[in-house]
Amino acid sequence: MPRCHCGVRSPIRTAWKCDYPGRRFYGCSGYETTRKCSFFQWYDPEPPARYSDVIRRFLETNEGIISENTELKKTRQELLDELRRLQQSVHETRAKLEATVAASMAMEDNMLASVATTRKRGVVIIVLISVIVLLVFFPIKVAS
């Protein structure tokens, strides 16, 4: 490993933001730090021109995939949030429906009890009318 201008051994790095993406080079370990050493030496031989074009297209495709993945994650989260809201709505609707069914059943029970009471009163009224009719048409003779 060569030494940089700082006297430190320079590690092998990979270039991604230059005309030779994917090409390896020696660069100062203090690069982009407080040390402003600009040591640079290619490690790999210069690749064919097509090499850089292919890697650049791969990088662009990768950026597109990352962007699409981010959008899909956002959409997935929005769908999950909507699903939670819908599940809550279903839960609330089910609770209201169960309360309505219970109230309806109580009303039906009250109505059936009312019908039974009305029938009993009707029978009593018919019996009383029958007794009155019998007394009117067939008066009871009292023995004197």
Image (cartoon, grey):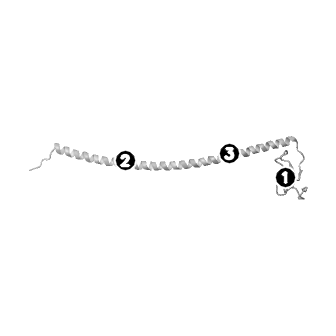
Q: Nearer the viewer, residue 15 or 123?
A: 15
Q: Nearer the viewer, residue 113 or 64?
A: 64
Give amino acid for label 1. Answer: Arg
Neighbour tally class for label 3: few under 14, some 14-19, many 20 plus, Cα within 10 Å: few
Q: Residue at x 31, y 46 (%)?
A: 119
Q: Which residue is mark 3?
A: 72
Left or right, 66 with respect to 5, comes to left
Q: Residue at x 68, y 45 (%)?
A: 72
Left or right, 107 with respect to 77, comes to left
Sequence-first tag of 2 and 1: 1
Residue 31: x %, y % from top left: 84, 55
Give amino acid for label 3. Answer: Leu
Neighbour tally class for label 2: few under 14, some 14-19, many 20 plus, Cα within 10 Å: few
Q: Is mark 1 in CB contact (under 8 Å) with mark 3?
A: no
Q: Residue at x 24, y 46 (%)?
A: 127
Q: Which residue is mark 2?
A: 111
Q: Which residue is mark 1?
A: 13
Indicate the quadrant where residue 4 lies: bottom right
Q: Residue at x 34, y 48 (%)?
A: 114
Sequence-first tag of 1 and 3: 1
